[in-house]
Amino acid sequence: MSGPVPPADGPQPVDLPAGRSYLCSCRRSRQGWFCDGAHLGSGLIAREIQLEQPGTVLMCGCGRSRRYPLCDGSHGRAAVKPWWSWWR
Ligand code: FES
């Protein structure tokens, strides 16, 4: 196989209202992208985002973003091969 590994899923647009929103960073929420407190005890915290006007943000669908749950463009980069695969 040559070229970058295609992402499992790309950015997911989500409409947010004006004001403060708390986004799920633990992937346990039953409210989709929005925090429902399920992160308690996981060591993670909700990501707070504040918009002056209602708007659309891009959420990470591939799980590789360093700013999860927000997309940072990592879905477009080649996956890093584990060091032991160099000898294959
Ligand atoms: S979808 Fe863009 S970084 Fe994951």
Image (cartoon, rainbow, N blue to C red):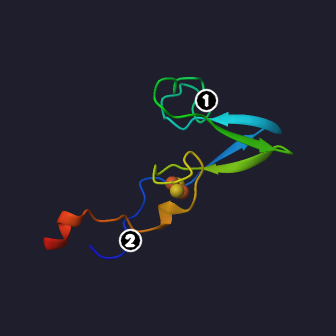
- x and y percentages locating residue 45 in the rendered image: 57, 34
Residue occupying the point 78% across, 47% down: 55
- x and y percentages locating residue 31 in the rendered image: 59, 27
Residue occupying the point 77% across, 36% down: 20
Disc 1 + disc 2, Cβ < 8 Å: no
Image vertical order of residue 53 relative to residue 11, above or below: above
Mark before the other along the chain sequence, 1 or 2: 2
Disc 1, SS:
loop
Task: Pick whichever, 13 or 21, lies toward us.
Answer: 21
- Which of the image's four quarters has the C terminus? bottom left
Asked if residue 14 lies left or right of residue 55, the reply is left
**Quadrant hosting residue 47:** top right
Neighbourhood count class around disc 2 (C-alpha, 10 Å): few under 14, some 14–19, many 20 upward: few
Rendered image: mark on residue 4: 2
- Which of the image's four quarters has the N terminus? bottom left
**Amino acid on which disc 2 is placed:** Pro
Residue 10 visible in the displayed image = no
Task: Pick whichever, 82 or 56, lies toward us.
Answer: 82
**Amino acid on which disc 1 is placed:** Cys
- x and y percentages locating residue 52 in the rendered image: 86, 45
Residue occupying the point 46% across, 49% down: 63
The residue that label 1 is drawn on is: 35
Residue occupying the point 51% across, 34% down: 44
